[in-house]
Image: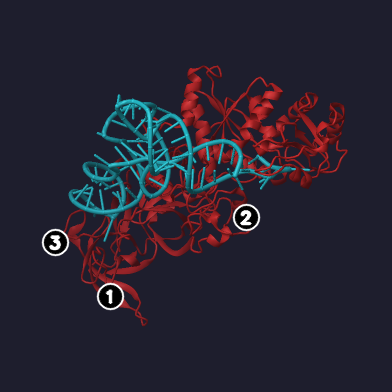
Chain colours: A red, B cyan
RNA sequence: UGGGCCGUCGCCAAGUGGUUAAGGCACGGGGUUUUGAUCUCCGCAUACCCAGGUUCGAAUCCUGGCGGCCCAGCCA
């Protein structure tokens, strides 16, 4: 996209990696991983992490693994795993190895046994409620559990029986023995294993004992030989625990966890729980609804992988909480599509124009370039005839200042065709404008009119040749920049986030459009043929990806 | 309030003791244009949260404030 020849911008993680490489810290290797929990679809925030992890690896001749962090089967599913693989691939990245935390359940268990033998973990019979009370508060130290000094033999025995399913859910947990007085609450004997009788999408009913994230993640990283474990800021306080587990276990690899700020985008939300709620409560049509900030939603809206990658590069990587304006994302797709999308003409809200001095049955096939700056994209023929359709808003009875479209008695250029003049306005009984009677200047095809200047250029389609289409005009899903700040984020939903236009007429060449193809509808914006609702090819359905930049409407 | 992290233009973001404090987005203005698009040119932080200090020299180092985010799941 922008400045492809430029060096990628410096950021603190690239610097750390470069330094490690210089010091030969991990034998000069870089192995990262992208570790989503398969409990939802990937969103633009994940794209930031994906681009970072795969990008850092690629820049340093390294590799990146995809790992499903599937330690809590309650919210996870195979559908989500498949969607995640599809989205990462679509973004243009190839993982070196595909893993699941669940692949390591056996090893994880054995490591836990080792921890117990070393006197570093114990089986606790305190209830969840009691554990909370014993944990202390932000300002007060916690109390040690009565079970904390259970003998190693007894811990071993109990832990083995936890595994074989001898105890009910929640009866015991395995805890790390660290420091109940630590100022870091994560170090106050954190839970390592809980008993939960849940069917796991991969291991079935093999286990009733599931490891916690903090225990699983560091070991999984170590097993895979990850060099740099990149995660978001909220895990900063977990790093001491990450390091504690690996140090106690003495694993052959000890990855370095580095935290960066997660993406916050205005006018949307990034919480998987809330995104899931939008889907299940039908506020949107699905995870791939074009208004969703998911990769699948953006893709269906017409965003390209290149534009999303460009966005991730532009926003940078820091440890600072920041809010990115929607305009940054929109600008990325505009830049891509301006460069690559062929142009076409579509009239969203048609107004009939009869050209009185044009021969009744004449049809001209006008040659029009597919891209004004790129002749290599070729051209197409557009039929012109006596009755054409223009955009309602391109005619004004009482024009605002600086209006340069069609007015009564005025002239305007029909893009790629002739200059026409409005002679008469026809209205119905209600006073609604239903038709314009115009004349055309036959001497203005491909040349400027003589003796006068015509400033305006408007798009059009030939009435009898045009194809009918449906256009879905999407707007931001939320009307507030930070829906999460609301008591109920649903209150911030934008009631006008989808407008369905059914009277749309498009030029006939669009009959060849394929699902996902993007076009610039001249003077309006970028649109793509919907990938879901065009299966049968019965009706053309276009999604608006983004408008064109518009310096006019802002001044009106 | 304990701990961790963060504070450079409206929004991002480079900068790591000596630079006129990069760049992008946004914004304002000129030019080109058969898209009010694109493209192009110009403008846009004497200033780096504040206050002291160290230094010939500080956004960068020190001290003290102020402001923001995260942590008390048997979620990740």
The residue where tag 2 is placed is A277
Left or right of B65 on screen, residue A342: left
In the image, what residue occupies the spot 26% across and 69% down? Answer: A399
In the image, what residue occupies the spot 33% across and 47% down? Answer: A370
Q: Nearer the viewer, residue A10 or A381?
A: A10
The residue where tag 1 is placed is A425
Q: Is residue A354 visible?
A: yes
State which quarter of the image contains the C terminus of chain A: bottom left
Parent chain of label 1: A
- How far, Cα to Cα, is label 1 from label 2? 50 Å
Left or right of B4 on screen, residue B20: left
Image mark for residue A358: none
Disc 3 element: loop
The residue where tag 3 is placed is A452
Q: Is residue A454 above or below residue A320?
A: below
Classify 10 Å Cα crowding around label 3: few (below 14), some (14-19), many (20 and above): few
Q: Nearer the viewer, residue B76 or B13?
A: B13
State which quarter of the image contains the N terminus of chain A: top left
Determine the image quadrant of residue B15: top left
- The answer to whether marks 1 and 3 sit on the same chain is yes
Q: Tag 2 or tag 3, which sits nearer the N-term?
A: 2
Q: Tag 2 or tag 1, which sits nearer the N-term?
A: 2
């Amino acid at each position: 996209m922008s400045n492809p020849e430029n060096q990628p911008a410096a950021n603190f993680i690239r610097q750390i990696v470069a330094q490690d490489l210089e010091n030969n810290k991990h034998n000069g290797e870089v192995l990262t991983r992208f570790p989503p929990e398969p409990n939802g679809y990937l969103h633009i925030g994940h794209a930031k992490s994906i681009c970072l992890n795969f990008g850092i690896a690629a820049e340093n001749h390294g590799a990146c693994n995809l790992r499903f962090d599937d330690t809590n089967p309650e919210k996870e599913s195979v559908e989500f795993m498949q969607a995640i693989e599809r989205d990462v691939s679509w973004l243009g990245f190839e993982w070196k190895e595909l893993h699941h935390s669940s692949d390591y359940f056996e090893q994880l268990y054995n490591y836990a046994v080792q921890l117990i033998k070393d006197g570093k973990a114990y089986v606790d019979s305190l209830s969840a409620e009691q554990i909370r009370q014993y944990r202390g508060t932000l300002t007060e130290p916690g109390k040690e559990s009565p079970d904390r000094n259970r003998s190693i033999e007894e811990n071993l025995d109990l832990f083995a029986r936890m595994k074989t399913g001898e105890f009910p859910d929640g009866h015991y947990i395995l805890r790390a023995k660290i420091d109940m007085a630590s100022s870091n609450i994560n170090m106050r004997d954190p839970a390592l294993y809980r008993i939960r009788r849940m069917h796991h999408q991969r291991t079935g009913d093999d286990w009733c004992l599931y490891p916690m994230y903090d225990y699983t993640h560091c070991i999984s990283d170590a097993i895979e030989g990850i060099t740099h474990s990149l995660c978001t800021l909220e895990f900063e306080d977990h790093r001491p625990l990450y390091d504690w587990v690996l140090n106690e276990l003495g694993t052959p690899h000890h990855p370095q966890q580095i935290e960066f700020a997660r993406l916050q985008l205005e006018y949307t939300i990034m919480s998987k729980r809330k995104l899931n709620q939008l889907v299940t409560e039908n506020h949107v049509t699905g995870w791939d609804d074009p208004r969703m900030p998911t990769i699948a939603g953006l893709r269906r809206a017409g965003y390209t992988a290149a534009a999303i990658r460009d966005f991730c590069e532009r926003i940078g990587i820091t440890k600072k909480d920041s809010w990115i304006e929607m305009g940054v994302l929109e600008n990325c797709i505009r830049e891509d599509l301006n460069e690559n999308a062929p142009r076409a003409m579509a009239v969203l809200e048609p107004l009939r124009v009869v050209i009185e001095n044009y021969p009744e049955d004449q049809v001209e096939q006008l040659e029009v370039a597919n891209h004004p700056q790129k002749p290599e994209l070729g051209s197409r023929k557009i039929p012109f005839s006596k009755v054409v359709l223009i955009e309602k808003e391109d005619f004004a009875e009482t024009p605002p200042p600086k209006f340069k479209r069609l007015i009564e008695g005025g002239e305007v250029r029909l893009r790629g065709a002739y200059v026409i003049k409005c002679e008469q306005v026809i209205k119905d009984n209600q006073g609604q404008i239903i038709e314009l009677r115009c004349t055309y200047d036959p001497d203005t095809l491909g040349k400027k009119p003589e003796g006068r200047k015509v400033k305006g250029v408007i798009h059009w389609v030939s009435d009898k040749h045009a194809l009918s289409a449906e256009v879905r005009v999407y707007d931001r899903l939320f009307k507030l920049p930070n829906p999460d700040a609301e008591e109920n984020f649903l209150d911030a939903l934008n009631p006008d986030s989808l407008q369905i236009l059914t009277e749309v007429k498009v030029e006939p060449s669009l009959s060849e459009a394929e699902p996902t193809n993007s076009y610039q509808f001249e003077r309006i914006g970028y649109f793509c043929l919907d990938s879901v609702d065009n299966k049968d090819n019965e009706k053309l359905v276009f999604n608006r990806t983004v408008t064109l930049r518009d310096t006019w409407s802002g001044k009106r």
